Image: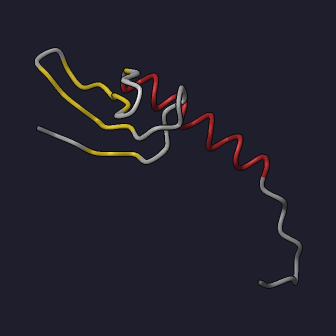
């Protein structure tokens, strides 16, 4: 059994997601609420989240170091 867990990534309850596979193929399921996502649906949501995070990040000022 393949079990990869992504912490706090469920769009429904912010629970932990686990990548599962059965005879019908791979799918992603929330360990807390049981919501099920296809791999493609989950990848699309991750890409949208990355774009949102990049837009929300403040631009770095030249010459300023942290």
Query: Can you name the residue that lies furthest to the top here?
Result: 24
Residue 5, image x and y in percent? 33, 45
Residue shown at the point (41%, 21%) measured from the top left: 35
Residue 36, image x and y in percent? 37, 20
Residue 27 placement, left or right of 45 = left
Q: Quadrant of residue 42?
A: top left
| Front residue (pair 42, 7) | 7
Whether 56 is drawn above or below 23: the answer is below
Query: Can you name the residue that lies furthest to the front here?
Result: 32
Q: Is any part of residue 37 visible from this angle?
A: no
Whether 62 is drawn above or below 16: the answer is below
Residue 20, image x and y in percent? 23, 31
Residue shown at the point (29%, 25%) measured from the top left: 27
The N terminus - image quarter: top left
| Front residue (pair 17, 41) | 17
The C terminus - image quarter: bottom right
Whether 23 is drawn above or below 28: the answer is above
Q: Number of marks in the image?
A: 0
Residue shown at the point (28%, 35%) measured from the top left: 19
Q: Quadrant of residue 65?
A: bottom right
Residue shown at the point (78%, 46%) measured from the top left: 55
Residue 48, image x and y in percent? 62, 34
Q: Is any part of residue 36 visible from this angle?
A: yes
Whether 6 is drawn above or below 22: the answer is below
């Amino acid at each position: 059994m393949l079990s990869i867990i992504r912490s706090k990534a469920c769009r429904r309850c912010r629970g932990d997601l686990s990548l599962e596979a059965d005879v019908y193929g791979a799918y992603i399921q929330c360990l807390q609420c049981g919501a099920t996502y296809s791999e493609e649906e989950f990848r699309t949501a991750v890409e949208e989240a990355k774009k949102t995070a990049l837009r929300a990040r403040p631009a770095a000022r030249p010459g300023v170091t942290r």
